[in-house]
Amino acid sequence: MTHIVLLHAFPVNRHLWDAQAEYLSKAGRRVLTPDLAGFGDSRLPQESTMAALAEQVLAQVGQPTVFAGLSMGGYILMEILRQHPEMVTGAIFMDTKAGADTDQARDQRLEVADAVLAAGHTRDLADATLPKLLGETTRASNPDVVAQVRAWIEAAPPEAVAAAQRAMAGRPDSVATLRRYEGPALVVWGAEDTISPMADQQVMLDAMPQAVGREIPASGHLSAVEQPSAVNDILLEVLSDWR
Ligand code: MLT
């Protein structure tokens, strides 16, 4: 029976995966949804690096397994593949990208890190990021999901936001890492995702010729909560195929 570790996005927490954890558990899969980088119940990492975030995850994972990482979770999965490829029996990259930041994006992350620490809250971050995280369909027709994601962001400790932003700012390009990976792979993206658009998905698909690509209609960047049933079905399908 294949098990799975689900790695959440920035700046939310493990509850991003509640629908998938419930669905896959009922289907008999063991599911681990760790909080990352000081979000939720997790501790701040020792250092603000992707390596430290990956180590925090691996400390909770006893054996090689399938991983799914959504956006920041995908960056952590790429770091695990770089440092400990033997721990990955299948890789699912959701709404993420393999490239490093541009200088401008890096500077912006460091500014956000400083700003949330100075403010001591993440309400402004919620205002700024919600319209980008959620697709237009969700924003127009699913106020419960909009409110839930806002609540998660507002509950995020500023220190976790700063640590994660600094770690993501320093992350290397992962295209060569994906090229080296020969195990089963799936690339999933929301059709309305503007943070990780199709061009970024194509880079990952080109780097892993064995990867299957799946687009989720009517979803933005946070597909796990915007279209949970579609994501549930895709995950169970691949877990059944990747024995
Ligand atoms: C995420 O959803 O985890 C973020 O969009 C990642 C990022 O800021 O690059």
Image (spheres, grey):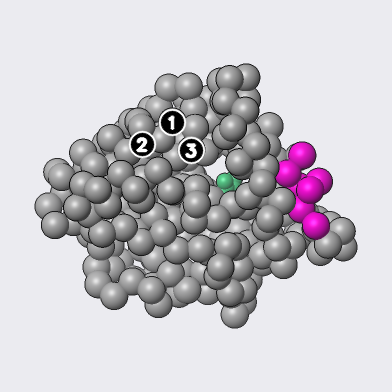
The type of residue carrying mark 1 is Gln
Question: Which residue lies under the disc numbered 2?
Answer: 231
| Residue 28 shows in this picture | yes
Q: Measure how far apart labels 1 and 2 are at the Cα level.
A: 6 Å
Whether pointer 1 and pointer 2 mark residues with C-beta atoms closer than 8 Å, the reply is yes
| Residue 177 shows in this picture | no
- Left or right of residue 236: residue 131: right
Question: Which residue lies under the disc numbered 1?
Answer: 227
Question: Which residue lies under the disc numbered 3?
Answer: 225
Q: Nearer the viewer, residue 107 or 24?
A: 24
Q: Nearer the viewer, residue 208 or 18?
A: 18
Magenta-drawn segment: 121-127
Helix, strand or loop at mark 2: helix
Helix, strand or loop at mark 1: loop
* Mark 1 neighbour density, 10 Å: few (under 14) some (14–19) many (20 or more): some
Residue in the picture at 57% in, 25% down: 142
Quarter of the figure with the N terminus = bottom left
* Rendered location of residue 177, percent (x, y): 38, 58
